[in-house]
Amino acid sequence: MRESGETFKKGGAWVAAARCYAQIGEKEEALTLLENCYQHRCSSLATLKAAPDFEVLQQEPRSQGLAVKGRPDVSVRQRVALLPR
């Protein structure tokens, strides 16, 4: 699975790569890839919350920040800081 993740990452398929990393429990790498995708406005993030492959990430604050709507000039990390604690 890690090999597939690396292949997808090198090809720019960040969501597919993140899915591979999430499935093997590498949450940090998966979230970094999803943040990269978010910054590049990947349309494939629209189904992030519904994808069962990403359930392992749903409790992570960085993942929750990806779903926060708002101004496009606000980074994911800034959005996470705005979430209620």
Image (cartoon, rainbow, N blue to C red):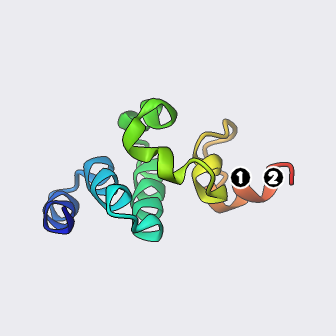
Q: Residue at x 39, y 68 (%)?
A: 26
- Kindly identify the amino acid type of the residue bearing the numbered disc 2: Leu
Where does residue 45 sit, x and y in percent of width and height?
43, 38
- Foreground pick, 11 / 4: 4
**Label 2 CA crowd tier, 10 Å (few <14, some 14–19, many 20+):** few
Q: Give how far across and how far down residue 28 sits, in percent.
A: 47, 69
In the foreground, 21 or 65: 21
The number of discs equals: 2
Quarter of the image with the C terminus in it: bottom right
- Work out whether 12 lies above or below 28: above
Q: Which residue is mark 1?
A: 79
Q: Are the two marked residues, 1 and 2, in contact with CB atoms closer than 8 angstroms?
A: yes
Position of residue 71 measured from the top left corner of the image (x, y, whole percent): 68, 41
Left or right: where does residue 57 sit relative to residue 10? right
Dividing the image into 4 quarters, which one contains the N terminus? bottom left
Q: Which of 51 and 33 lies nearest the eye of the viewer? A: 51
The residue positioned 15% from the left and 58% from the top of the image is 11
> Residue at label 2?
82
Which amino acid type is marked by label 1?
Arg
As helix, strand or loop, the secondary structure at mark 1 comes to helix
Q: What percent of the width, then of the height, locates residue 73? A: 63, 50
Q: Is residue 85 left or right of residue 1?
A: right
Residue 52 found in image quarter: top left
Q: Residue at x 67, y 52 (%)?
A: 74
- Alpha carbon of mark 1 to alpha carbon of mark 2: how far? 5 Å
* Residue found at the far right of this picture: 85
Q: Quadrant of residue 12?
A: bottom left
Secondary element type, mark 2: helix
